[in-house]
Image (cartoon, grey):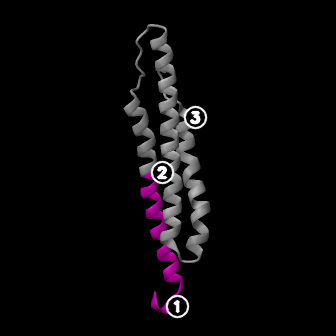
Amino acid sequence: MNHLNWRYIILAAIVPPLVGLIVAFPFWRKRRMTLGNIFATAIIFATSIGLILREYAEIDKITTECLDAGIPCFPVPSAFTRFAIYAFIGLLQVIAFFSFSLVVEERMRRRDYSPEWR
């Protein structure tokens, strides 16, 4: 209750972008950049929301147990801070993902031109 669950924070930082890349790459190869980005973004945001809901359930369970015992307790760091961590991780991943997709799209577009025209 008085600490962050670093295991889930590391999971949120590593797994969703990798899964997003795996899902988006086939669309990118077919030059469907927008669809690949949409699916990857959905995966990243869904994971962030799922982890926020998991954190909410954990805080609610612990707080309810404390109140049933007659002891008022508050999570440290606050629930907002815990939720914001997952939300910002997801948002930064989406921004990085879109930036990376622009680089991939530019390279694919340049490949279509002969070397003399590049």
Crowding near pointer 1: few (<14 within 10 Å), some, many (20+)? few
On the image, the x and y values in percent for residue 42 come to: 50, 56
Amino acid under disc 2: Phe
Query: In 3D space, how far apart are the residues under numbered discs 2 and 3 (Cα atoms)?
Result: 18 Å
Callout 3–callout 1 Cβ contact below 8 Å: no
On the image, the x and y values in percent for residue 3 come to: 48, 24
Residue wearing tag 3: 7
Query: In 3D space, how far apart are the residues under numbered discs 2 and 1 (Cα atoms)?
Result: 39 Å
Q: Residue drawn 54% across and 33% down?
A: 6
Amino acid under disc 3: Arg
Q: Earlier in the sequence, mark 3 or mark 1?
A: 3
Q: Residue furthest front?
A: 68
On the image, the x and y values in percent for residue 89 come to: 45, 45
Crowding near pointer 2: few (<14 within 10 Å), some, many (20+)? some
Amino acid under disc 1: Ser
Q: Earlier in the sequence, mark 2 or mark 3?
A: 3
Question: With respect to residue 34, does 87 lie above or below?
Answer: above
- Would you say residue 76 sits in the magenta stretch? no
Residue wearing tag 2: 45
Quarter occupied by residue 28: bottom right
Q: Would you say the magenta stretch is mainly helix, strand or loop?
A: helix
Depth order, front residue of 61/44: 61
Q: Which mark is nearer the camera, 2 or 1?
A: 2
Crowding near pointer 3: few (<14 within 10 Å), some, many (20+)? few
Tell whether 26 sits left or right of 65. Answer: right
Q: Which mark is nearer the camera, 2 or 3?
A: 2
On the image, the x and y values in percent for residue 60 come to: 47, 25
**Res. 114 mark:** 1
Report helix, strand or loop for mark 3: helix
